[in-house]
Amino acid sequence: MDNAKVPGRADQRLIDHAREHGFVVTGKQLSGWRRHGLLPANAHGGGLGRGRGSTSQPVAASFDLVIGLARLSGRGKRPADLALLLFGEGLPVPEPTARAAFQAAVDRVCLPGGGDPGGDAEAHLDAVDSYIDHGGQAVVMLPARARRVDEQIVAFFESAGVPWPPAELAQWDENLGAEGMTPQGASLLAADALLTGSTPLSSLGALLRGMSPGLEVNPIASLVETTVRDVPHSPVLGPDDSLGMLTGDVRSVLRELAATAATEDLGAAWRTARAVRAWALDLCARAEKELAARAPGEATMEWWISRQLPAGLSLLDELRTRNERATATALSALGLLLQREQFAEIDRVQPGCQWDLAQTPGFLPPPARDFLALPSTAPAL
């Protein structure tokens, strides 16, 4: 005897709707999706009278959600992943569920060696250091694919008798020959920035040098390293010459953003994060194609410029991840929202920043420029 519960009329409408669109959905699946907050309950439709019970019907949003859930569900897809994917597609997943999924993505950010939220930052950093010393994985500073593109660019120009990078760049690097940060140092810097919300500019410069090991001249790293000298007593720099408008664990700030940001902003940030990834992968593929044909052109130049500027951080970050993951996109989206807030706060405490420089090719990933809504540059005095 089959003890499976027979779906009610309302659920049967959803099952039939899915079938009409080529998907098989069961009453058990509908119940599971509702239990995880992915699908609204059916709306009460009133009584039938004479003790015959009451009716119910699916709410309008359920029809689109059922199709989306049937299409996106699969092995290894957790409820939070489904909530993020539904939200990212603009489907009407319940707002509390979507926000909880963004927060769950933040909760998955744990430091190696036992660095969970809370507790003493120094103890967490010691745990990360010990983890790496004992064979744990350090940060991959330069993905192999990016390294190959860099090397091919240098090899092409050298084969043509053109020194690369141009010798003229040396005059713009005041710390010529300075050592770049090691993967272990980068791991500790990332952990420290996560736990404290700040990064010393000297360390950031060393990080930029470490991410371009084949570049003997690095004017951008030099610019970062000399910022304190050029802009003394800046209100946006901390007492240790650190860049950061936050204090404490960044994860708590990201959770708050997930809970309070306008849904329209979350959606725009999600779409921007996906567009940044698409830009990075496309740029790399186009540069590889040009170099394989020994005809470096627009893509190769954009790659090289981006690698020396902040856009290169996003470029490398996307190349480190082979497959797109919903949680990674959610974290990138929250990071973009935080970055936009930080730019606005910097402009508030130190008006007149040269925001027009952020429009320079390579400074930001093109998809991020409009989203970040950079403050307008103040007129020169």
Image (cartoon, rainbow, N blue to C red):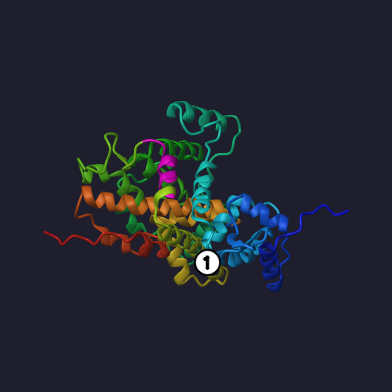
Q: Is residue 264 above or below residue 247?
A: below
Residue 130 in sight from this viewpoint: yes
- Measuring from the top left, give residue 40's x and y in whole percent: 57, 57
What secondary structure characterizes most of the magenta part?
helix
- Measuring from the top left, give residue 93's x and y in whole percent: 54, 59
Q: Which quadrant does the C terminus fall into?
A: bottom left
Q: Nearer the viewer, residue 135 or 33?
A: 33
The furthest residue to the front: 50
- Measuring from the top left, give residue 61's x and y in whole percent: 55, 65
Q: Nearer the viewer, residue 236 or 139?
A: 236
Residue extent of the magenta highlight? 248-258
The residue identified by callout 1 is 282
Identify the image quadrant of residue 180.
top left
The furthest residue to the right: 1
Q: Amino acid at mark 1?
A: Asp
Q: Is residue 358 left or right of residue 132?
A: left
Residue displayed at 30% across by 52% down: 343
